Amino acid sequence: MSELVNRVQPVKVGVEFTVIMPVLNECQILAETYRRVKNVLSALTVDHEILFVDDGSTDGSTDMLHALTRRDSAVRVMVLSRNFGQQAAYTAGLEYARGRAVILLDADLQDPPEVIPEMVREWRNGYQVVYGHRAERKGETWFKRASAAIFYRLLRLVAGAHAPVDVGDFKLLDRKVVEALNRCPERSRFLRGLVSWIGFRQKAVEYVRDARSAGETKYSLWKMARLSIDAFLASSRAPLRVGTWFGAVIALIAFIKRLVEPNDDRSRSPVRESTVFLLHGLGMLCQGLLGEYLSQVYLETQGRPLYIVSQVWGDASPQRYHHRRRSPNPPRPK
Ligand code: UDP
Ligand code: MG
């Protein structure tokens, strides 16, 4: 990996705040989202931009966003060439944002924009990452709440302190943090883990996560499971050691059994069918884990861009297109 050089250029900082919102088919709610975010930002400063990243919408959201750029010069829109996923959309926004502070906000109003001034206060107090901590989650199924609670705790257990519990993508990042994130080249992105890994002075702000007021979640069970698996793989190598531990424990048991029953033969102690299945299952699980890590390595070495921009609207200053590019080190002098 050290042979790969990340060539993302820092963006020229232009405004005080950027709010980045990824959008996938949110036409039912976009007008209200814009209104609430605009109210909050206008009360804070005139010097702001609202950066929507259209992540392959097909429901008319794209046209609505285009119309917004004509109405408000503070609105910028990046249209991605297809759906690349919420984490890639945020990443795209981070690379295009020009604010001295950047706020990540879902476009479905589950995370209330009215919390932003409190985040800004903490930023002005000297914190470089101010993240929203969900004190309560309204209107979500018990399954989503339970799976999220287990997920965050398990992640913390496995990946150490790098993943605060009950924290989503809603956060404010100082320009320094944004530049640091833009230098992280990995394809498999779990921004929450990455942000806590990066360090800097971090502070939590409590808020109540609302129910979606319109539309429905874009995270199917499968997509959620995929994000969780990616989060684990990206945050920790501990699952790789599962095989080592299983192997060690099983070998130890077999060894002790041999000591206790030195004359053990098949007729006296038949190996149960269920034991064979169990051991095979464990073996395959470990192979599967290995495969997951291997596939991550494969994806990383392919080195494709994480997203592709098809259009940018509402950008008055010269545009800076820079996909995350990686190229091998220049040849060493002989
Ligand atoms: N989103 C996106 N691309 C995707 C999935 C979601 O840009 O592939 C956006 C979506 O429009 C919303 C935010 O990401 O603004 C969060 O998605 P969602 O509300 O569906 O996730 P949940 O809150 O249910 O976890
Ligand atoms: Mg949501």
Image (cartoon, rainbow, N blue to C red):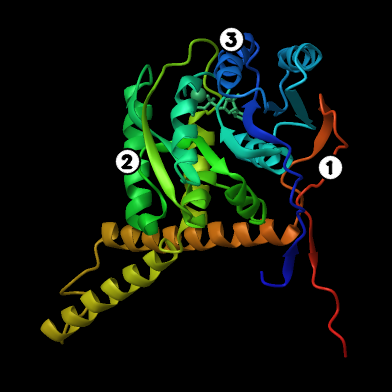
Q: Quick one: 287 or 108, which is closer to the camera? A: 108
- Considering the numbered disc 1 on the image, is that residue within a helix, a strand or a loop? loop
Chain-order first, disc 2 or disc 3: 3
Q: Determine the CA span between mark 2 and mark 1.
A: 41 Å
Q: Residue furthest left?
A: 260
34 or 250, which lies in front? 34
Q: Position of residue 247 (x, y in %)?
A: 34, 72
Residue 218, quarter of the rendered image: top right
Q: Earlier in the sequence, mark 3 or mark 1?
A: 3
Q: Which residue is under mark 3?
A: 32
Residues tagged 3 and 1 counted as in contact (Cβ below 8 A): no
Q: Which residue is mark 1?
A: 320
Which of the pair 141/52 is nearer the observer? 52
In the image: residue 55, left or right of residue 235 = right
Task: Name the residue type under label 2.
Answer: Ile
Q: From mark 2 to mark 3, how far is it between C-alphas?
A: 33 Å
Give the SS element for disc 3. Answer: helix
Comparing marks 2 and 1, which lies closer to the viewer? Answer: 1
Tell whether label 1 touches label 2 (CB within 8 Å): no
Q: 235 left or right of 39?
A: left
Q: Which residue is mark 2?
A: 150
Amino acid found under the numbered disc labelled 3:
Glu
Q: Position of residue 183 (x, y in %)?
A: 67, 56
* Rendered residue at 42%/61% (across/down): 239
- Say which of marks 2 and 3 sits in front: 3
Q: Position of residue 312 (x, y in %)?
A: 82, 29
